[in-house]
Image (spheres, helix red, strand yellow):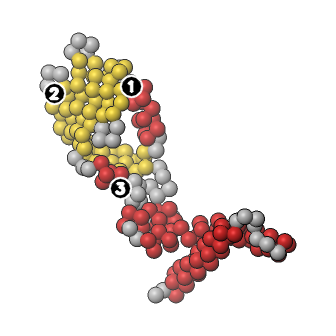
Amino acid sequence: EMEAYAPDCVYADPFVSFSGTNRFKENVGNLGGMMRDIKLDVYDWQEAEQEVLTKWRFSCILDLPWKPQLAAAGSTTHVIDPEIGKVVKHIEAWDVEPKKVVAQLFKPSAKIPTTAAETFFFALSDGDVKGMWFGLSLLVFKISLPITMVSLMFKLFTGDGLPGLSGFETVAYIALVSSAITEVAKFVDGTFGK
């Protein structure tokens, strides 16, 4: 499967550069297992004496809870060593800034969020603090409720809160009340509208 490549082939893209087909296979295996709905369109191919240049468009959905879509266009140059007849350099160039590709990781592919994770990451990608809180509030409630209950039980039986954790208890109480109010507001808004 990698027979066209020299074992010490250099791989480079806008994020990383390394040598070795084993590492390349590991990287592709790690990321490749997370990709769904892969689309790759090679739309141009140019051969030179010791190089092959391909131009491509690529998109996929990553198998993360918020299902981000990655999309980019670019080119790959394969440099061939004529003495061994193998690719010694695999160099990718993208037609989009790498930071824009990274930003795609935080934006769900769904147009309408259907999960709390999608809501959170849509809001994060738009810089919407209220939306991020709405996406997290139920999780915050579920985490802070048992902490608050244990703290109240300690106070009931010992007269004191959790030993050495008074600041933590305060944060848990505030988180519980804030998230409960948010969840009630979301319910009322969803039930009665604005």
| Residue 15 occupies quadrant | top left
Left or right: residue 191 compared with residue 77: right
Could you say where residue 56 lies in the image, as x and y percent from the top left?
Answer: 24, 41
User: Disc 2 on helix, strand or loop?
Assistant: strand
Can residue 20 be seen by looking at this rendering?
yes
Residue 21 - label? 1
What residue did someone put label 2 on? 47
Evaluate whether residue 176 shows in this view: no
Q: Nearer the viewer, residue 190 or 6?
A: 6
CA distance separating discs 2 and 1: 23 Å
Q: Amino acid at mark 3?
A: Ala
Dot 1 falls on a residue whose secondary structure is helix
Cα separation, mark 2 vs mark 3, equals 34 Å
| Crowding at mark 1 (Cα within 10 Å: few <14, some 14-19, many 20+) | some
**What amino acid type should be assigned to the residue bearing mark 1?**
Thr
Question: Disc 2 or 1, which lies upstream in sequence?
Answer: 1
Residue 29, horizontal then vertical, whole percent: 45, 35
